[in-house]
Image (cartoon, rainbow, N blue to C red):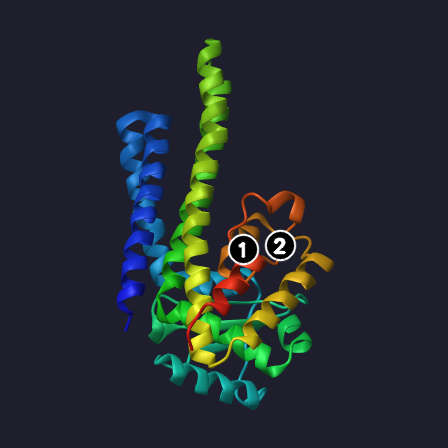
């Protein structure tokens, strides 16, 4: 069951998600008037529908994840089961990605359909306490139903960027000769995705702070998560994931820390809070 504070936070997040959907509809209106607005509303509904029913399958396929059976790693399964009991949710399915940077994400439309995916880099480079703390963080996302919201936000925000670009090229090659129209189209292409990104950042950061605090309570200690986040962040800077598709990069907010981060490029538009702020939040959490 979602706590009162969790419910309040979710209401705020759903409010931001509504604004994001409204932007999507507005882009449709700008492209094709009332008809475009209706099409935008339909597409927003379809994307949310797809995110609800198929987000786990889509995300796992996107990152080439494979299921870990109990026979393959009984110790990790046992620890996952105990942590899930602490969180008060059913034991999620356990998957792994071959990414060599330490990281993890959760998906699934509700706790009964939850999935936790760890990377090879996480299991191979962090100790058991640190891995457990990361899993506790992902279980918190599942318990709070953040996974569904994250999938919807990533899908709609990505679509807004594509539609804004279409609006610009449509104005450029649509026979418009008015210079003001072209300037407006260019401004529209630049500003609209930025607004969508800022909303996406606000949603993701709220979720990360809350999941960090919940993870401390699920795991029963603070040191494991602080240490894990520090190692994950440092490893991502040393060997950032390369050769990723646009869709993979768009799903960065699903991970405990951005595995595709470049300090120079994502400093101002990161979907995750700063490491120091996260550690301060962890230290302030009551056990």
Residue occupied by mark 1? 252
Residue occupied by mark 2? 260
Q: Where is residue 78 in the image (x, y as percent from the top left)?
A: 50, 89
| SS label for mark 2 | loop
Q: Position of residue 259 (x, y in %)?
A: 61, 58
- Which comes before the other along the chain, label 1 or label 2? 1
Q: Quadrant of residue 73?
A: bottom right
**Relative to the observer, which residue lies in front, 276 or 248?**
276
Residue at 56% over, 76% down: 223
Residue at 40% over, 46% down: 156
Taking the image as drawn, is residue 66 in sight?
A: no
Above or below, 126 against 202 in this view is: below
Q: In which quarter of the image is residue 98?
A: bottom right
Quarter holding the C terminus? bottom left
- Badge 1 crowding class, 10 Å Cα cut-off, few under 14, some 14 to 19, many 20 or more, is some
**Relative to the observer, which residue lies in front, 209 or 185?**
209
């Amino acid at each position: 069951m979602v706590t009162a504070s969790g419910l309040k936070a979710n209401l705020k997040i759903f409010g931001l998600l509504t604004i994001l959907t409204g932007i999507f509809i507005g882009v449709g209106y700008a492209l094709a008037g009332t008809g475009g607005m209706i099409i935008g509303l339909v597409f927003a509904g379809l994307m949310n529908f797809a995110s609800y029913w198929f987000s786990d399958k889509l995300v796992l396929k996107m990152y080439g994840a494979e299921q870990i059976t109990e026979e393959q790693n009984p110790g990790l399964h046992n620890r996952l089961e105990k942590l899930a009991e602490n969180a008060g949710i059913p034991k999620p399915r356990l998957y792994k990605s071959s990414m060599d940077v330490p990281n993890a994400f959760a998906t699934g439309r509700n706790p009964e359909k939850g999935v936790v995916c760890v990377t090879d880099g996480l299991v191979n480079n962090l100790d058991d306490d640190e891995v457990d703390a990361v899993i506790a963080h992902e279980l918190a996302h599942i318990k709070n139903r953040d996974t569904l919201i994250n999938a919807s936000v990533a899908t709609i925000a990505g679509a807004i960027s594509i539609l804004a670009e279409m609006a610009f090229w449509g104005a450029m090659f649509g026979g418009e000769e008015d210079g003001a129209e072209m300037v407006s189209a260019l401004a529209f292409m630049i500003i609209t995705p930025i607004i969508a990104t800022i909303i996406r950042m606000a949603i993701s950061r709220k979720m990360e702070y809350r999941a960090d605090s919940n993870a401390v309570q699920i795991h029963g200690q603070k040191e494991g998560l602080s240490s894990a986040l520090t190692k994950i962040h440092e490893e991502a800077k040393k060997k950032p994931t390369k050769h990723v598709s646009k869709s993979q990069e768009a799903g960065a907010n699903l991970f405990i820390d951005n595995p595709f981060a470049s300090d120079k490029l994502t400093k101002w538009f990161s979907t995750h809070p700063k490491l120091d702020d996260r550690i301060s939040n962890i230290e302030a959490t009551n056990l």
